[in-house]
Amino acid sequence: MPTPEPILRFSDTQLDVARDTLMRSYGKAAFFRGADVGLRAEGSTGAGEVVARLFVETGQAGCDFDRADLPSEVAGVPVEVITAAPVSACETRRPEVPSGQPVPQVMGGASLGRLSGATGTAGLLVVDRQSRQIGVLSSWQVLAGATGRFGDVILHPGLADTDISRADQVASLERWTRGTDGDAAFAALLPGQSWLPLQFGSFQPVSSVRTARLGERVYRAGRGTTQAQAIVEGAGIYRVAYEVAPEQVEMRDVRAVRLRPLDRDAAAGAGHQGALWAAGPEQAGIGVQFAMDDAGQTGAGAVVLVSPMTHVLDCLDLEVACFEPWLSSAAPQEASITPSRWGSVEAFLTEYAGRAEAPSPCTGPQAFATAGGFGDQLPDLAQEDDMQQLLPIWVELRAALQDRGFGDGALRISDPIEALQVTAQCGHDAVAETIRRLPVLPMVEGDQLRGAKTFVEVCRLLRAQTPATSGPFGK
């Protein structure tokens, strides 16, 4: 069914003045949940008319107020007062949507995440306007989060979609924004990392980016078995709950486009953080998803917030990646011949504990409780074989094996040793000789490895033989 045209009776300037007046007048109130320019709700008098809207919350202690005291008109523009559920950028569930078959190339719509556990979706491929580096744009929660630092490891697929041994470091965190310029983050692809300027699922390029139009139907380009759809119903500033430090949730005011989901999949936030929303058959990008109503339900009251694409690209000094740089080179500029090692993983593992962003004072209402943040460490990763201790050893061993020409460039810690591609030597002897050539690992003989079936068991053996004073591999 075609979307009806919005009823516009006021100029953009009049509407912006009315919205900004609402922000100044009520932005510090405990009940404030946002102010925007948007459509009157369906079923109300004047449905479809473009007005100024004030969002309020009455569900928390200390937030009670008299609706009769709120204005029905500001600067000559009608005001619609809307009771809104809390909106959260904190993922509290593991992804419930399929990530699809993993592909070696990084592209928009693919699973992406941080080593600390947060998993979401790559929005689209972008280019740094200054350095001309190729990178990926996603949400703040997916790429940075409460503990994010410059250079942090970005994985593909994200750890909630795969085992840590099958996730590859593909990028490093460069910069991010979260506030009145929107919510987004940029990670630069590592030299040699393959990429495609397409969206996973449709395998079509993003033709352009533009401002969202009130009343238009948009769709999410990314993971999932169906194409989620929504209606653009407003644009303004909204109060959103964030995990600003581990297990500490506070409210922040963020510029966003407000979408009304048309189906259940559109309102399912788990795993869709960072996904691109687009309009038209030309797949014009209008925003990156970063928040949803805390109830996570469809129907009346359901909402998805996306960062306005043109705004965040200008803020982060980025542009959409196209086929021109891809055709000149299958990898980002200045790519090395040999793929880079996971050099920063070891440093990450030794420095990460206890690291957190210094929280800003909460000027908004009291934060509502959440049942754990999606950015928390995944508890099962630290249990089986103590993977955090084995991973630094595997990083060194895998790189040394590949430098000697063993393996096909895609060795996994869970692979059987006998799968190693060797000729004159058996797999165990080749691994033992490689270890002896590497001074950072303890000396072993082939006979000592005979009982090991996989590289996990080799790393466990090396870990047990490592002295307690041996730096990052120590106990």
Image (cartoon, grey):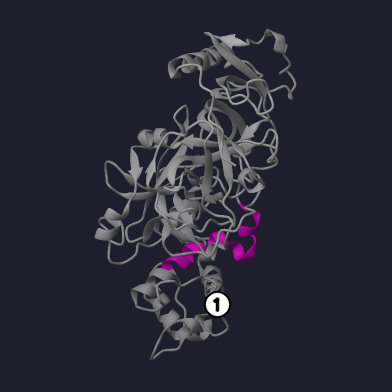
Q: Residue at x 50, y 81 (%)?
A: 417
Q: Residue at x 41, y 77 (%)?
A: 407
Observer-nearest of 352 and 33: 33
Which quadrant holds residue 64?
A: top right
Residue 338 percent location from the top left of the image: 31, 67
Please state which amino acid type lies under the numbered disc 1. Answer: Thr
Assign a secondary structure to mark 1: loop
Residue 252 percent location from the top left of the image: 55, 28
Q: Is residue 453 visible?
A: yes
Q: Is residue 89 visible?
A: no
Q: Is residue 340 magenta?
A: no
* Dominant SS in magenta: helix
| Magenta-drawn segment | 378-396
Residue 247 percent location from the top left of the image: 63, 38
Q: Is residue 8 above or below residue 244?
A: above
Q: Is residue 160 above or below residue 268?
A: below
Observer-nearest of 145 and 327: 327
Kindly identify which residue carries mark 1: 454
